[in-house]
Amino acid sequence: MFAEGDRHDRADWPLLQNGAVNLFHSPEILADACADLAALGYALAEISCRDGSPGFERQFADLLRWQDQFGYLPWSGNLDALNDAMAGYPFGSSGKSALVLDGFHLIADADRDRAHALLDIFESASRDHLLFGHILVVLVQTDDATYACPGIGGRSANWNAREAARRRR
């Protein structure tokens, strides 16, 4: 997957070294990360959390080809079903994808436990996809500069390197 010698210099390395779920406050820094990943051949899938749960669920149903996978629409928001559906996450020919969640603080503000469960599902799915040679990075934009998520997938969600210090958010 990586050529010898270029592992630590790649833009995806810091986004994967501590887990696949990365938090972003600044839309500009998120855009830089997206551009860097696109330059590495990552397919970008953007999901807006700004329209509330119905919009979020509809976008995920479209992304995960819910009708094709399960034979029904829409996704009802059931987290067990989402966990199952993530096994069929669509990767492009490069086998690398970035899932971008914009405005995740709105999901977290509505239900912290559900937000935690979502990130846990994405972290676990990313790790599972690695077993098949696919890379899934999750970029989570939140307007809440103090957002913290308990451990997910046995790990915690980490602030991206450029905003790791609170003063930079």
Image (cartoon, helix red, strand yellow):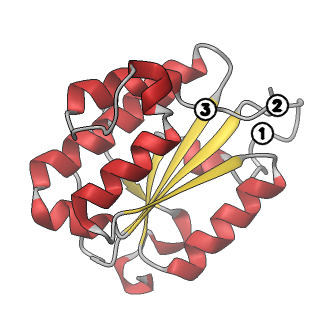
Mark 1 or 3, nearer chain start: 1
Mark 2, secondary structure of its residue: loop
Label 2, label 3: how far apart the Cα atoms are: 21 Å
From the viewer's perspective, is residue 118 above or below residue 166? above
User: Is residue 151 at all visible to an observer of this figure?
Assistant: no
Q: Which mark is residue 165?
A: none
Q: Is residue 167 above or below residue 135?
A: below
Q: Amino acid at mark 1?
A: Arg
Q: Image point 24% across, 73% down: which residue?
A: 146
Question: In the depicted view, which residue is nearer to us: 165 or 92?
Answer: 92
**Is residue 98 found left or right of 107 in the rendered image?**
right
- Distance from disc 1 to disc 3, alpha carbons, whole Å, reads 24 Å
Q: Amino acid at mark 2?
A: Phe
Of the 4 image quadrants, the one containing the C terminus is: bottom left
Q: Does label 2 or label 1 sit earlier along the sequence?
A: 2
**CB atoms of marks 2 and 1 within 8 Å:** yes
**Residue for badge 1:** 7
Residue 1 occupies quadrant: top right
Figure label count: 3
Question: Label 2: which residue?
Answer: 2
